[in-house]
Image: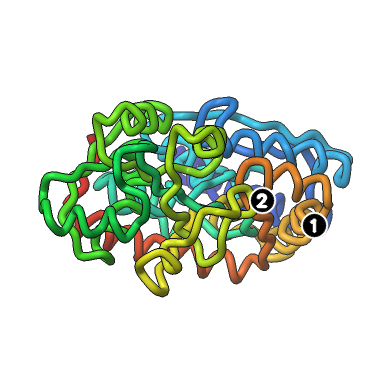
Amino acid sequence: MRQTIERRLVVLAAATALITYQACAQTYPVKPVRIVVPFTPGSATDVIARMIAPRLADRWGQQVVVDNRPSAGGTVAGGIVAGALPDGHTLLLASSVFAGSAALYPKLPYDTLRDFTGVTQIGSTPMLIGTAAGNGIKTLRELITLAQQKPGQINYGSSGIGSGTHVGGELFRMTAGINTVHVPYKGTPEAINDTIAGRIHFVVTSIVPAVPLVRSGRLAGLAVTTRERAPILPDVPTVSEAALVGFNYEGWYGLIAAARTPARVIERLSVDVGIILRNAEVAERLAALGALAKPTSATEFDRMVRDEIVIRGKVLKAAGATAE
């Protein structure tokens, strides 16, 4: 008898949850929305979340809270969203690290492909390949030639194993056909500082922290990794222009929800965020971060994330990267 009652209670709870989030599809949002950020306050991901949160709150008449949960390469934040009720009230502000974590961490608290659905891309950002000014390396072609002449003796820094800069560095190495040594750092500033000091030969970095150093002449910007030049550093060529035709690699930011979130909720989110990203002030603030506003449909972004998981996984596997 007791087991029968317990089973009925479980069924009732599941039915109630189902009715609740189906109803939300009609009236979303019906309560405060939480945007979970995988990194610390002040990080680019956090800044972007806090940029869009108040604007969404104004549109919806509901509070939108930014919740920072930095740990384990963003997997803690991912676990929170994967385990949330799929009603669109708990969202993940993800960066391209999200795609790399699927390959880097053998045991995740979620299935990256099964437990999430993309809402919209927010922006894209180039990486910069830089070296110390005055060390004799003036172009990307010269760096590649030096690495070919000294296999295994040229090293580069990134912001850590599995980071977007690490994936970018390995993709550059593989495409150029050179044998370089990866030196992971705790963060971008440390990698850049050691590059300028000459302790490592070059760095692959997100573009924003490098901009003032390139402009001051302390860091030589050899190339940016995207198809087009970065407006924030227009004189720095692309990797494709400088040496490797067709090369393209970019970091990205986007909004992700739990799988099984009603399609109408996903559509509402995608449209509303897209309207915000098309605002001139928001686009300018993203540009100051070195990012290009790039709103997409939910279908486009979900497909892109799934492709990125496969691509970045292959790069990290080929590099022999493992979680520390």
Residue at the bottom extreme? 246
Q: Position of residue 116 (x, y in %)?
A: 51, 56
Q: Residue at x 25, y 35 (%)?
A: 200
Is residue 273 left or right of 109 when viewed as pictured? right
Foreground residue among 188 and 83: 188
Is residue 76 left or right of 202 when viewed as pictured? right
Per the image, the residue denoted by label 2 is 87
Label 2 sits on a secondary structure element that is loop
Disc 2 versus disc 1: distance between alpha carbons?
25 Å
For residue 155, which quarter of the picture?
top left
For residue 45, which quarter of the picture?
top right
Looking at the rendered image, the disc whose residue lies closer to the viewer, 2 or 1, is 1
Q: Position of residue 8 (x, y in %)?
A: 54, 47
Per the image, the residue denoted by label 1 is 278
Q: Position of residue 80 (x, y in %)?
A: 50, 38
Is residue 105 left or right of 216 when viewed as pictured? left
Q: Amino acid at mark 1?
A: Arg
Q: Which mark, by number, is residue 311? A: none
For residue 318, which quarter of the picture?
bottom left
Q: Residue at x 28, y 66 (%)?
A: 175
Do the numbered discs 2 and 1 sit on residues whose CB atoms are within 8 Å? no
Foreground residue among 249 and 19: 249
Q: Earlier in the sequence, mark 2 or mark 1?
A: 2
